[in-house]
Image (tube, coloured by chain):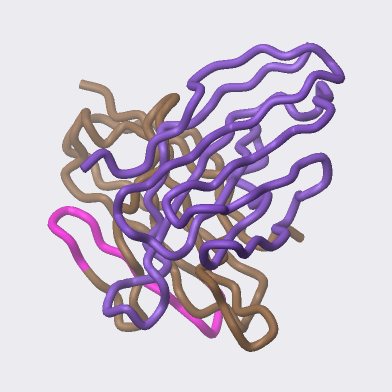
Amino acid sequence: RKEVEQDPGPFNVPEGATVAFNCTYSNSASQSFFWYRQDCRKEPKLLMSVYSSGNEDGRFTAQLNRASQYISLLIRDSKLSDSATYLCVVNQRVGGTSYGKLTFGQGTILTVHP
Amino acid sequence: NAGVTQTPKFRVLKTGQSMTLLCAQDMNHEYMYWYRQDPGMGLRLIHYSVGEGTTAKGEVPDGYNVSRLKKQNFLLGLESAAPSQTSVYFCASSYKAGQGANAYEQYFGPGTRLTVT
């Protein structure tokens, strides 16, 4: 089983649609959770951190379910500029310490069309 | 403030050749990382460094060596390139945990596209 698993998609949605991505992780000791965005042939960029109580940043809402080891990202009112690959990222605790060693999912491709 | 830069941007090597990829950051970050990204595999950590003069192995270190002689630079070396090392290589850096910033917010360079024939 992969440490971080995502539905690779692709998701094709019209502008204005609401779309949700899911992610599961295998290490129950994981501490921190993130969504990164990666545009075609570009580097990943942090979109948002994911907090236990859930958090929102504009049109983006992230949720974490530690019991089910599940993370989600909801995008409302999709824009053309939201087209990208969305990476689920988990920080794994190793040996009682962690130096920001992140484990990345393989990404979910989103295409927003007019 | 350039953030994280990588050189070169593109390179084609023949099997057995060697090369060094350079990563530089101007954000005074303690931690630096080298990843490779392959289709369907996601980003995988090759080596990382928690400070000047220190390095450690990541998930896929074989065939690579690294050095961190200066805080702002992190070098990735391929001693004898193999076709399996054809990939996109990303360098990243982050603050140290406890510095009042999120140590897991990694800032990535633009990547190096390497092809080994």
Q: Is residue B95 above or below residue B20?
A: below
Residue A10 versus residue A35: which sits nearer the camera? A35
- Chain A, chosen colour in render: brown
In the rendering, at what x and y percent does residue B92 appear?
46, 49
Q: Is residue A36 left or right of residue A99?
A: left
> Which quarter of the rendered picture does the C terminus of chain B lie within?
top right
**Residue B32 place in picture, x, y as percent:** 50, 56
Q: Residue at x 29, y 75 (%)?
A: A54
Seen as rendered, the residue at the extreme left is A58
Position of A55 with respect to B70 (left or right) is: left
Location of the N terminus of chain B by quadrant is top left
On the image, the x and y values in percent for residue B103 come to 40, 70
As displayed, is residue A89 above or below residue B115?
below
Pick whichever, B48 or A84, lies toward us: B48
In front: B83, or A31?
B83
In the displayed image of the protein, which residue is found farthest to the bottom?
A96
- Asked which quadrant contains residue A8, the reply is top right
Q: From the image, state the color of chain B.
A: purple
Count of marks placed on residues: 0
User: In the image, what residue occupies the spot 65% across and 33% down?
Assistant: B38
Residue B5 in picture, x, y percent from top left:
39, 36
Residue B41 lies in quadrant: top right
Query: What range of the chain is rendered magenta?
Result: A56-69
The residue positioned farthest toward the front in the image shown: B69
